[in-house]
């Protein structure tokens, strides 16, 4: 990866945030984290991100509302979704709303890295 890409990871589980931050930073991504959709929205307003990687089920503002706001206010941001509560209708709705990819926890790291690189590279 030539350029350092900015990724915002949103999840209400601190352990997942920390693990993803460490792993993605080691792979060359510049990572910021948020513990819920409201915190993520503030960070989206204050910084430029190539990719938003968000959980669905969270307090304060869930991932679906965050996808809706991000697509409306930050259309250049690529959105990837992950959740521990997989349901076909949730996946279809997230994709219809503008998410590029939907992952189930535990995250398949090779697939996630491939999607992140692809999303970041398509920014150029």
Image (cartoon, grey):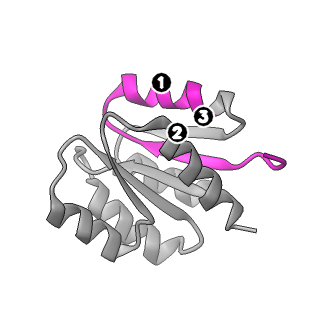
Give the residue at mark 1.
19
Front residue (pair 78, 109): 109
CA gap, disc 2 to disc 1? 15 Å
The first of marks 3 and 1 along the sequence is: 1
Secondary element under disc 1, as helix, strand or loop, is helix
The first of marks 2 and 1 along the sequence is: 1
Give the residue at mark 2.
110
Image height of 13 relative to 96, above or below: above
Give the residue at mark 3.
24
Magenta span of residues: 1-24
Q: Is residue 61 left or right of residue 21?
A: left
Neighbour tally class for label 1: few under 14, some 14-19, many 20 plus, Cα within 10 Å:
few
Asked if the stretch drawn in magenta spans residue 50, the answer is: no
Q: Residue at point 42% right, 38% down? A: 108
User: Does the image show residue 48?
Assistant: no
Asked if the stretch drawn in magenta spans residue 17, the answer is: yes
Observer-side mark, 2 or 1, equals 2
Where does residue 62 sit, x and y in percent of width and height? 26, 53
Where does residue 43 sit, x and y in percent of width and height? 53, 50
Q: Residue at point 25% right, 44% down? A: 58
Q: Are marks 3 and 1 in contact (CB under 8 Å)?
A: no
Where does residue 33 sit, x and y in percent of width and height? 50, 38
């Amino acid at each position: 990866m030539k350029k350092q890409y900015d990724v915002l990871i949103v999840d209400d589980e601190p352990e997942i945030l920390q693990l993803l931050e460490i792993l993605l930073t080691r792979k060359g991504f510049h990572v910021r984290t948020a513990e819920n959709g409201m915190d993520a929205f503030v960070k989206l307003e204050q910084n430029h991100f190539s990719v938003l990687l968000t959980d669905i089920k969270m307090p304060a503002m869930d991932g679906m509302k965050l996808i809706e706001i991000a697509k409306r206010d930050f259309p250049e941001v690529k959105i990837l979704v992950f959740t521990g509560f997989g349901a076909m209708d949730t996946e279809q709705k997230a994709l219809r709303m503008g998410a590029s990819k939907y992952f189930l926890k535990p995250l398949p790291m090779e697939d996630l890295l491939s999607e992140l690189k692809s999303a970041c590279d398509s920014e150029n």
